[in-house]
Image: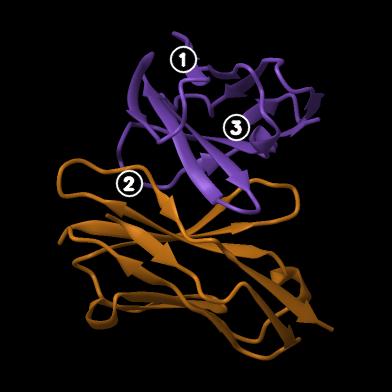
Amino acid sequence: KAGVTQTPRYLIKTRGQQVTLSCSPISGHRSVSWYQQTPGQGLQFLFEYFSETQRNKGNFPGRFSGRQFSNSRSEMNVSTLELGDSALYLCASSILAGEAGELFFGEGSRLTVL
Amino acid sequence: AQKVTQAQTEISVVEKEDVTLDCVYETRDTTYYLFWYKQPPSGELVFLIRRNSFDEQNEISGRYSWNFQKSTSSFNFTITASQVVDSVVYFCALSEAQSGNTPLVFGKGTRLSVIA
């Protein structure tokens, strides 16, 4: 079956702009998590959604937001981009929320902020 | 607070050598899960193993083996007879489970280079 799909794969923005990233989970998976990966901070949890509700949120400013749709697809938005937002944004899905089970990751959206 | 430390940033070995990737964790929970993932150049993290805190049995899967020791808070990963295809980044991760499973906390990763 198809894996986790993230779009776009690469994008370049300038400071002050906003960006929306999309994630389509594996069919039947209802939980979607987002992680930010940077060389300095490593992998950091952004948020988790289950059944259109945010279940958990990491320690990121309010410029980072997300949502989940009824078909389990998720989007995350970053407003007023800063240089430090340049990162690989990874989406992961699982069947249920908080299972501590295997997460299935997409290949990520690589954001460059100039 | 939970924390995962992978002290080895990069490791280089010659093909067919055995290599051990270290992972040390910190948690106050008595119930937790430990994971290993790998990340190839394409970017996606690929699940390798999950261990719960009550199961200290070592596990072997092909050339991969894992040594979980609660006494030293370590969950080390050994690749036997390494191959060039093993040259990716490996991450150890922790999820606390005392009050509902928390999101994964990852170590900084270990980049393994296997030289032919």
The image shows residue B74, relative to residue A107, as above or below, that is below
Image point 45% across, 40% down: which residue?
Answer: A45
Residue designated by label 1: A68
Image point 15% across, 49% down: which residue?
Answer: B98
Residue designated by label 2: A100
Looking at marks 3 and 1 on the same chain, the residue that comes earlier in the sequence is marked by 3
Residue designated by label 3: A4
Looking at this view, name the residue that lies furthest to the top: A70
Viewer-nearest residue: A72 or A21: A21
Q: Is residue A72 visible?
A: no
Image quarter of residue A22: top right
| Percent x, y of residue B7 | 51, 75
Query: In the rendering, what colour is chain B?
Result: orange
Looking at marks 2 and 1 on the same chain, the residue that comes earlier in the sequence is marked by 1
Q: How far apart are marks 3 and 2 (CA)?
A: 18 Å
Image point 40% across, 63% down: which residue?
Answer: B4
Q: Please, what is the three-letter code of the amino acid marked with disc 1? A: Gln
